Image (spheres, rainbow, N blue to C red):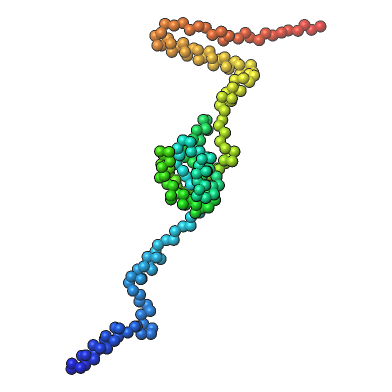
Amino acid sequence: MGLRDKKRNQRRVLSRRSAGPRTGEGKDFLPLEGKEQRIREKQQPEEPENTATVLYIGHIPHGFYEDQMQGFFQQFGAVKRVRIARNRKTGKSKHYGFIEFENPEVAKIVADEMNNYLLFEHTLQIAPVPLEKVHAKLWKGVRKGFVPVDRVAIERNKLSKDKTVEEHKRMLEGIVKRDENRRKRIKAAGIDYECPPLIGSVQPSAKKIKFDED
């Protein structure tokens, strides 16, 4: 092969490289980078749609109650319901609660922006609650507000009510039994003390009244 033939072959190779692929060729081949990118996009799962509207709020400071909480979070969007966990006997806050928004997007913004927010020397802990984990009785009685149980009134009514003969007898037996246990503990402790006797511990038996038959 002469010098002219070599130059001619080189020109053909260069012209083929510079020219695009022929018709029907190169359809099954893609650049490596583009192919990897498409494979990654297919492998990545789609993010689930955000539908949570209820947020858990922990580390609630003292004084930041239902009215204050609703007024504070209304700057983000419409607040539907607010509930703070409280002690059933005293009504005091347990420093955690739940808040529900009308829009799930607003709830997501609040969870992202207000988590670990410092409020009255307390760091708020906010997290969304999925719909399937919201308890069915979470919002029961939230419209009425919290009404603490009046234990004093319950005990007062219990002691003030009229007792039957059997109830009065059981009450006296309990008093006498507790007094006997108290005397035994004092004697076992080596204390020389004579407890005064209980007055009225012995009740007179009921008298039977006989009526003369005329």
What residue occupies the far right of the structure in this picture? 214
> Is 160 positioned to the left or the right of 183 in the image?
right
Q: Relative to the observer, which residue lies in front, 11 or 110?
A: 110
Residue 90 can be seen in this image: yes
What residue occupies the far left of the structure in this picture? 2
**Percent of width and height locating residue 159:** 59, 20
**Percent of width and height locating residue 178:** 50, 15
In the displayed structure, would residue 32 be above or below residue 141?
below
Q: Quadrant of the C terminus?
A: top right
Residue depicted at x 46% and y 52%: 109
The quadrant in which residue 189 appears is top left
Residue depicted at x 40% and y 66%: 42
In the displayed structure, would residue 8 be above or below residue 60?
below
Residue 53 can be seen in this image: no
Q: Relative to the observer, which residue lies in front, 135 or 148?
A: 148
Numbered marks: total: 0
Residue depicted at x 51% and y 30%: 90
**Percent of width and height locating residue 73:** 50, 46
Q: Quadrant of the N terminus?
A: bottom left
**Percent of width and height locating residue 96:** 47, 40
